[in-house]
Amino acid sequence: MRKYLFLLGLFFVTSFVFGQKVPPANWSHNISKSNAKVGDIIEVIFTTSIPEGYHIYSNDYGDCPPVKAKFIYNQNLSFELVGNAKAIGSHHYMDDIFECEVADFENKAEFRQQIKLLSSKPDIEGVLEYQMCTSDGMCVIFEYDFRIEGLTVLGKLIVNPEQIQSKPDIIVEEEEVVESAELEISTDQESNSETQNNVQSSEGYTSFAGLISEDSVHYSSYQATSKEDTASCEIKTFEGSSNQDTTTYWGLFILAFLSGLAALLTPCVFPMIPMTVSFFMKDGSKAKAIRNGFIYGTSIIAIYVFIGTLVAVVAGPAAANWLSTHWLPNIFFFLIFVVFAASFFGAFEIVLPSWLVNKADQQSDKGGLVGIFFMAFTIVLVSFSCTGPIVGSILVQSAGGAFVQPLIGMLGFSLAFAIPFSLFAIFPNWLNSLPASGGWLNSVKVVLGFLELAFGLKFLSVADQTYHWGILDREIYIGLWIVIFLLMGFYLLGKIKFSHDSDMPFLKVPRLLFAIATFSFVSYLVPGLFGAPLKALAGYLPPMSTHDFNLLESHEEHKPYYAGVKPLYEDKLHLPDGLRGYFDYEQGMEVARKIGRPVLLDFTGHGCVNCREMEARVWSDSRVHNLLDEKFLVISLYVDEKTVELPEDEFFYDKKGKLIKTLAKKNSTIQECYFDANAQPLYALLDNEGNLLQPTKTYDLDIEGYIQFLQSGLAEYQNRMTTKQ
């Protein structure tokens, strides 16, 4: 409360400050040496005397409201800041008003900034913003304009003169200075004699800053020139390879079949198994059970093949993306899981509508088929939120007019997907044949109810992430899972009893083992509340960027932006593990061209399970992380971001004549146009002209393979850029 009273008082007294004529500080600056060579580091010393009764806030304290001193440079390629401006002799203390630590100067202030010279004629100028305050708390913000002169620098230019003269509009604040890794300069003048753009570091990595001219690149070729422009997109291919599908029909079928088996383990599909058991758990002959199971499996296959191909032809892959990322279907699926969980807990029984049951009685065979088909359709509809991205590449082929391969792929996928459900439909009475089937079966249903409740949170989480509601951040999600599985463990131990449970005179060994496994899982979850990565659950949990209470965070200083360029949309979009990068294709490609780095194009999504797994298990490897942070520029393109609309002057038509207004649609258009794909994750390595450096890569947890992918792309990039010198 005291903070707000102070700020309110500060607002009212500002009108009197100017009447008291708070004086500015009399700043001056000098340099550590006036003679230097290109590549040398000089030190600029800023000093001022402070009148008695006044103080100036420093820049070397944490997150506390008083305005810090800030150095803003007119950035160009003739110099490079080395670290931040260092405060010399500042006084640190706990401020009674703001109740946090601050630092200031009295009598005298001094800052020192190290600068690396990259040109024989460095152009170094900027402004120092600082706050001069009286002892009773009245403050005025002043500016001190400075320009570094009197330098004699020997050596050859290591950048083009026109690049030095062309100053970008972007200013670099003290916290966002250009890092020395961006332009790695050799101090050996003879190594620079071959080229003015090529710069060699001690690690042997070459940066080609500005080698590709701005006029020679066109990043937005995915956009149609007009609504009537329906020309085909030019698919990016890697020289020496082809993006044409060479997979045989059998190979495609096997791959799709394996994908179907993998889809069974997704959080949208696995919890649907108890629904099948509940629906088919009724008396009947074995022949009827086999018939129903066969019809059930065939219905799933037919629905998947028909709907998948129809969606691809009529609506395109955007429909699958809408179903898996829009808030409406995700909230609907979440409510379905909650309703089924309540049913399994014994709150009520889920039955088919009475009109459907009556019709089934009148037309027994026909009615039975309707009920089975309805159940199959429900399974497909709910599970499509997770299976849609898996079959996305197949749907793209359908949309492009290739029908044979999509039909084979969808057949293989749906066959693997249908087999387990058909078996549960044929043999639901297996559970009834076990000893004490009644009590044991109800216990299974209750346990499955807990699982339904836990997995249902995934749908709510997807909607929360894509729309940035902030209601289900990572620690809240983990906390809910801990509560759910703790209750499940207590239930298995017999400490919680539901209305339909039988008396349990003693604890059986299987229940004890399941209880031990459940509590062990809870023990694994607990560190996640404090920031542990929980890599085994990376695909199910919200990203680390949503974790507010992270005790394990390293609290490293914010890394400077590449070339001082602040990423667009960084307030809503994030990269994992402290990686730097961009979220707009054109902005990222232009920055990469300026600093001379290859690009890793990362097509991802808030609700992409496999994307989170790749980030947690592959990108977190120190070797991969270092390559991405030090050798590449990462551009993460979110295809399911629902809140960011493009500026009106950036609207464009895609090759189908559709007006694109949102960032998500733009990113999806880029992926489909350039790479003929819509499934995430997709990784593409590009040079500064937008050409592929290697064939694209998808979901693959092989760390060594991913490192080879990056290293091969880096080597190809250096070879291409060297030939352009």
Image (tube, helix red, strand yellow):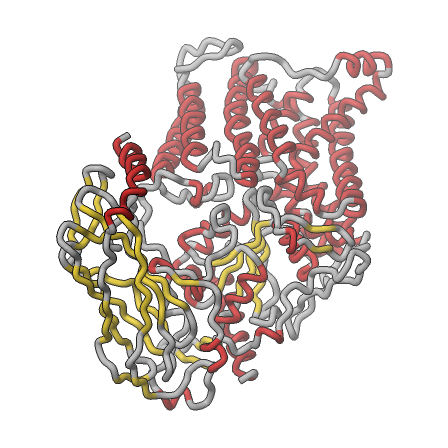
Looking at the image, can residue 719 be seen?
Answer: yes
- The image shows residue 345 at horizontal and vertical percentages of 53, 16
Check the image and report above or below for 304 versus 721.
above
- The image shows residue 284 at horizontal and vertical percentages of 73, 17
Check the image and report above or below for 312 versus 424.
below
Camera-side residue: 176 or 530? 176
Camera-side residue: 386 or 688? 688
Residue at 51% of width from left, 57% of height from top?
Answer: 582
Residue at 64% of width from left, 46% of height from top?
Answer: 389
Position of residue 610 in the picture relative to residue 658 (left or right):
left
Check the image and report above or below for 11 versus 483.
below
Camera-side residue: 151 or 411? 151
Residue at 58% of width from left, 30% of height from top?
Answer: 271
Check the image and report above or below for 506 versus 41.
above
Looking at the image, can residue 435 be seen?
Answer: no
Position of residue 278 in the picture relative to residue 564 (left or right):
right
- The image shows residue 260 at horizontal and vertical percentages of 65, 44
Query: How many dots with numbers?
Result: 0
Position of residue 24 in the picture relative to residue 524 (left or right):
left
Residue at 60% of width from left, 12% of height from top?
Answer: 348
Residue at the farthest front position: 19
Camera-side residue: 177 or 718? 177
**Which image quadrant: the N terminus?**
top left
